[in-house]
Amino acid sequence: MQVFAVGGAVRDSLLGLPVKDRDYVVVGATPEQMAAQGFLPVGKDFPVFLHPETHEEYALARTERKTAPGYKGFVIHADPDVTLEQDLARRDFTVNAIAQTENGELIDPYHGRADLTARIFRHVSAAFAEDPVRILRAARFMARFADFTIASETMALMQQMVANGEVDHLVPERVWQELARGLMEAHPSRMFATLRECGALVRIMPEIDCLFGVPQPPQHHPEIDTGVHVMMVVDYAASQDYALPVRFAALTHDLGKGTTPPELWPRHHGHEARSVALVQQLCSRLRVPNESRDLAVIAARYHGDIHRARQLRADTIVKLFEATDAFRRPQRFAELLQACESDARGRTGYETVDYPAAEYLQTALHAAQQIDTAAIVAATAGPDQIGLRIRAARIQAVANLQL
C-alpha cells in the first residue's frame, strides 16, 4: 500500500498558497484493507475513506470509463492494480495531476509543474471532455487564480463539449454549487468571461449572457454595456468580501435590461419588474437556496428606489421598509444595501464615490425602529387602529430626519 498527497493541496503548496483541505490517493489497497486499519468508508460512487484521526479523505486509485452523457455517466474501476499514473490521468488539469510522497518527492507525469510556472490550465487528456463539470471547474479556477490563462487547446475542447451538448446534462444542484463557489472567489467576473468564451454561459445562465451588448441607460454611462457593468458590480461586491447572497444579488439585479427591445435602447423602462420575473425563473431552474433567491428578488425590484432614497417621501421610505421586511429582518436589509452600493460603484471611476443612500436608509430604519410601540398600543382603543398608528409614528420618525 502506498499513499500520495494529490490535487489542490499539492498545487497550492507549490504556488505558496495556504492549503485548506488535503486529499490522498492510495495505491495497492483494497476496501477491506482500509477498513482493517480503521478508515471509515464514505464514498457512494467509488471507494473513499476518512482517516480515523485526521478525518482527511483517502481514495483508492481508480480509473473511469464513460458510458453515458453527463457527469454521472461513468463506470469506476478501483482495484489494487490501478497505478498512480493511471489515477492521475483521469484528473482535469495538469496542475491538479501532481502527486507527492510522504517524503516530499513530487511525481509529475503530465508536466503540471511547468504549467504552474507558466500559469496555464491545461487538460491532462482527451478524457477531460467526458465530464461537463470540468467546464464549471475551469471557470471557477479562473475566478480564483487571476494570473492564470486557459490553454488554447483546452478552450477549444471546452467549446466542442458545449457544441456536443455535454453541458446540457449538468444537474441544477451541481451548477449552483460551482457557481456559488466561483462567486465567492476574488474575481468572479473571470468565471463568467470563461463561460462566455466557451459558449456555456448561454446554456447555463442565458439571463446573464443576454446582458452583454445591451447599453446602459443614458444617465448610467451608456458607453459601458450592461453585461460589463454587471461584471464590475459583482467584482466590487467580491472586493468588499460580501456574503454569497449579496454577490448573487449583485449579479442578477439588472436581468430585465436583457429583455428590453433594441428599438428602445438605451432606455429600459419597467426593467425592475422584468428583472424580478427573470430572477425567479433563474433561481427556480438552478434551485438556488432561499437566502440567495430572496435577496436577489428584492434587490432586482427595489435597487432603483434605494438609489433615489434621498428624494423619497417619508411614507414611501416606510413602505420600502415594509416591502423588504426590514423591520423584522434588518440584517438582510443591510445586505440589500450592500448589493445596491455594489451596483452604484460598479462603474469606472465610481469605485470610491460616496453612496449616501445606504447610510441615510440605515439611519431612517433605526429612527423608525425607535418609536414606542408599547405606548401606542396602550393608548389605542381599537385593535384595528394599532397598525395604522404604528405606521404613522414610523413615518413621522423618518419625516423628522428630513426636516
Image (spheres, helix red, strand yellow):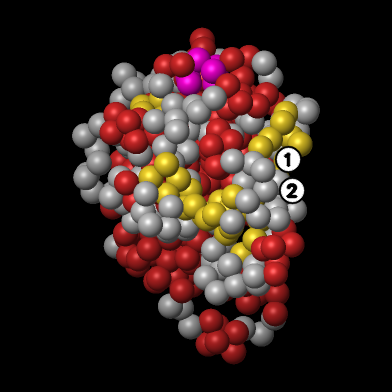
Asked if residue 105 lies left or right of residue 270, the reply is left
Vertical placement of residue 391 versus 243, above or below:
below
Characterize the local packing of mark 1: few (<14), some (14-19) or many (20 or more) Cα atoms within 10 angstroms.
some
Residue depicted at 48% across the width and 19% down the height = 155
Q: Position of residue 168 (x, y in %)?
A: 69, 26
Does residue 158 belong to the magenta stretch?
yes
- Marks 2 and 1: CB-CB under 8 Å? yes
Check disc 2 and give the amino acid type: Asp
Residue depicted at 32% across the width and 31% down the height = 114
Q: Nearer the viewer, residue 347 or 289?
A: 289
- Identify the magenta region: 154-159
Q: Nearer the viewer, residue 40 or 170?
A: 40
Which image quadrant: the N terminus? bottom right
Residue depicted at 32% across the width and 59% down the height = 359
Point out which mark residue 45 bears.
2
Q: Secondary structure at mark 2?
A: loop
- Mark 1 sits on what residue? 76
Does residue 102 belong to the magenta stretch?
no
Vertical placement of residue 150 versus 251, above or below:
above
Query: Magenta region, mostly helix, strand or loop?
Result: helix
